[in-house]
Amino acid sequence: MTDKYIELEHPGVLLEEDFLDDLGIKPGTLASSIGVDRTAIKNIIDGKRAITADMSLRLGLFFNMSSGFWFNLQKDYELRIAQRENLAKFEKVVRPFRAARL
């Protein structure tokens, strides 16, 4: 299965557009509220930095939601990138395990 026609958006785009912009929160306000440098938030929004487990916990607490939401967004994004960049190559060299039928 491939998602080659689905546009990849870094989770920072969602953070900015669907949370910060919609709620009227400035990136600097978020940064100071969760105890990180404003550059960290700016880099996430710009797609230059991943949302780590630590950042996921902070965002989850700030927005009063599951920290797993943020972590899973990042994980899914990275997996889609890996699929686009490597899946065809790996399909040529990886031999799937075939279990004997019992």
Image (cartoon, rainbow, N blue to C red):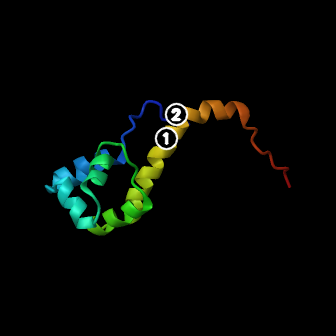
The residue under the point 22% across, 66% down is 33
Determine whether label 1 and label 2 are within 8 Å by CB.
Answer: yes
Q: Is residue 22 left or right of residue 82?
A: left
Residue 39 in percent (x, y) is at 27, 51
Residue 68 in percent (x, y) is at 42, 62
The residue under the point 41% across, 52% down is 73
Q: Nearer the viewer, residue 97 or 24?
A: 24
Location of residue 15 with respect to 5 vertically, above or below: below
Extreme residue in the left direction: 24
Q: Is residue 92 left or right of residue 64?
A: right
Q: Is residue 48 visible?
A: yes
Amino acid identity at mark 2: Arg
Location of residue 54 with respect to 11 vertically, above or below: below
Location of residue 53 with respect to 78 vertically, above or below: below
Is label 1 in a helix, a strand or a loop? helix
Q: Quadrant of residue 70?
A: bottom left
The residue under the point 72% across, 33% down is 93
Residue 27 in percent (x, y) is at 21, 54
Q: Residues within 10 Å of mark 1 (few under 14, many from 20)?
A: some
Q: CA distance from mark 1 to mark 2?
A: 6 Å
Kindly identify which numbered label has been placed on residue 90. none
Kindly identify which numbered label has been placed on residue 80. 1
Amino acid identity at mark 1: Arg
Is label 2 in a helix, a strand or a loop? helix
Q: Is residue 42 left or right of residue 57?
A: left
Q: Is residue 64 visible?
A: no
Q: Quadrant of residue 57?
A: bottom left
Residue at mark 2: 84
Q: Quadrant of the C terminus?
A: bottom right
